Amino acid sequence: MPNKYYITTAIDYANGDPHLGHAFEKIGADVLARYHRLRGEKVLFVTGMDEHGQKVAQSAAKEGRTPQAQVDEIARRFQEAWAALGISYDRFVRTTSEQHKIGVRALIERIFERAPDNFYTKTYAGWYCVGCEAFKTEEEIVDGKCVLHATRTLEWVEERNWFFRLSAYTDRLRTLIASGNFLQPRSRANEILSLIDQGLEDVSASRAREGWGIPFPRDTGEGEPQTTYVWFDALPNYITAVGFPDTSGEFAKWWPVDVHVIGKDITRFHALIWPAMLIAAELPLPKLVWAHGFVLLGGDRFSKSAGVTLDLQDAVARFGADPFRYFLMREVPFDADGNFSWERFEERYNADLANAWGNLASRTIAMIEKYRGAIVPPAEPNELDAVDAADMAAYDAAMQDNLPNRALEYIWATVARGNEYVDRQAPWKLAKDPTRQDELDATLAALVRQLTRQAIALSPFMPGRCAELLSQLGAPADFLATPGRLGDGGVTTFDVTGWRVAKGASLFPKREIA
RNA sequence: GGCAGGGUAGCUCAGCUGGUGAGAGCGCACGACUCAUAAUCGUGAGGUCGCGGGUUCGAUCCCCGCCCCUGCUACCA
């Protein structure tokens, strides 16, 4: 019985188009999902959209359409972007779906039933900025106006809301996060621990107004309509995606999730509010919350308003989706911030993909065609396989640790080794010496085995290019889809004898750098 | 302000509990080779290890002060 692996990304707020930051997270999660599929695990990869909130309603009004039409359009654009990038999600959750709304209300009711004192009503009073959709503190107010929305007048609002008793979970959350297993990387766990030490405050569970959202299932006893507030609206997508409130079937099969991949900016909600909600509802906790860093552009935080942007279409068009995925995964650590620049992209494309790996494939295939009639000769594994094994194991360990950037370094160590091996063996000399034909066979077969290993290991990163390489090497059509292509320690077993290679177009055509 | 993490070759970064010559990749220069996408392989280039003190036989790695950068410091998500 293969292991299951349930992985989610954050659901993106439907108030703008997908950008580099969104893409980085989805690509990272996709790489992990594909890696686990390669290991033969049963994988469920879920992503989606967070579609409620006043901002959505406002921008819809500005566009002159209904909120639903607005989020339908934005969801479509996100899905197009993910298709272009090869994101292999299994399900796309939308918080405006019936299934989700039912699940959210059921979760809240479940908490009312199992932890009745966890919800309570309280009057909240303060200056409310409609622009921000939030209450503002004194520091955020200048001349009686919100600093971010100087054209709007702040409203003094007193409203009675439902609150969730997050503070009651302080000790359990501290223990959970201090364990080091629940929230990673460690630096993020430390931040949350210090936040806990400052004292946790209870959080709003509803807003006392009708809005673009899910009606809170219970009123406050004063007849006011209550709309479910963001945490309770969005976070439960992870369980509604697998059928909640039905806790048998799908839910039983997939929950608890193996990893929530999120951005470091929303760590708090996933590391504090979400587990507290689940404990209150007596549901199992996620196994891991992984907070990745940000992709910076020229050292600056990606920001539409600051004009620091990068067009995804442009990024894909330039070299194709696979090189873009490779570049982001190689250049930006998954546990910290990293930089994006076109110059760097071109350098890495030419150095890593065109020159190092692409050319290794090219020269190998060309020699087999030239010296062996395109048929891979029989040969036993040799020292190249033996030395590569250590790198494959390191690759595997890095992938298990959710550090794809490090995993790539190990694969490129084998690529460098492959090119050195070719030069050392000098097949073009062996080919001229009738007494050394066995050596030539051994060399060429070793290279094909290595390229195959690399194509397997890199297929989560560059699925299209890796499939193309395997095709050029003459691997069976279903080679990658065959279970067990990647085992524990990155071990792979396969026989390349007799494969018919066929040199096609360059895997990664060299680009002239302007 | 507080807490946390950083400032190492042009660029991106490794350097575990202090000790022969401070490293890797990319880029760059020179040499070799010719199977290959003018690719590859080899060699080199010599960076005050943020600044100033201190501890020590000896510190990039320990302590103090300072400068600079980043993150967190809860209801936009």
Image: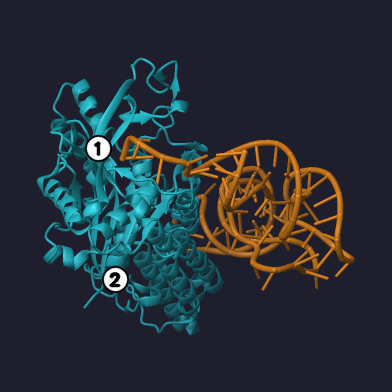
Chain colours: A cyan, B orange
Q: Residue A505, position in %: x, y?
A: 33, 53
Element on which disc 1 rests: strand
- Comes first in the chain, label 2 or label 1: 1
Q: Position of residue A133 (x, y in %)?
A: 30, 29
Quarter of the figure with residue A496: bottom left
Toward the viewer: B2 or A69? Answer: B2
Q: Chain under label 1?
A: A
What is the x, y in percent for residue A287? Answer: 33, 64
Crowd rating for badge 1 (residues with CA inside 10 Å; few <14, some 14–19, many 20+): many
Q: Which mark is residue A133?
A: none
Label 2's element? Answer: loop
> Alpha-carbon distance for marks 2 and 1?
70 Å
Residue A59 point in image, percent of width and height: 24, 26
**Are the residues at dot 2 and dot 1 in contact (C-beta closer than 8 Å)?**
no
**Is the N terminus of chain A in the top left, top right, bottom left or bottom right quadrant?**
bottom left
Q: Is residue A177 left or right of residue A218?
A: right
Instruction: Check if mark 2 and mark 1 are on a common chain.
Output: yes
What residue sits 50% from the left and 80% below the top?
A383
Three-letter amino acid code at the position of disc 2: Arg
Query: How many numbered markers are drawn?
Result: 2
Confirm whether residue A498 shows in the render: yes
Pointer 1 residue: A161
Q: Is residue B76 above or below residue A169?
A: above
B22 vs A380: above or below = above
Specify the subunit that label 2 lies on: A
Q: Nearer the viewer, residue A416 or A156?
A: A156
- Say if residue A504 shows up in the picture: no
Residue A403, located in which quarter of the rendered image? Answer: bottom left
Which residue type carries mark 1?
A: Asn
Determine which residue is flagged by label 2.
A500
Residue at the spot 21% in from the left edge and 65% down from the top edge = A254
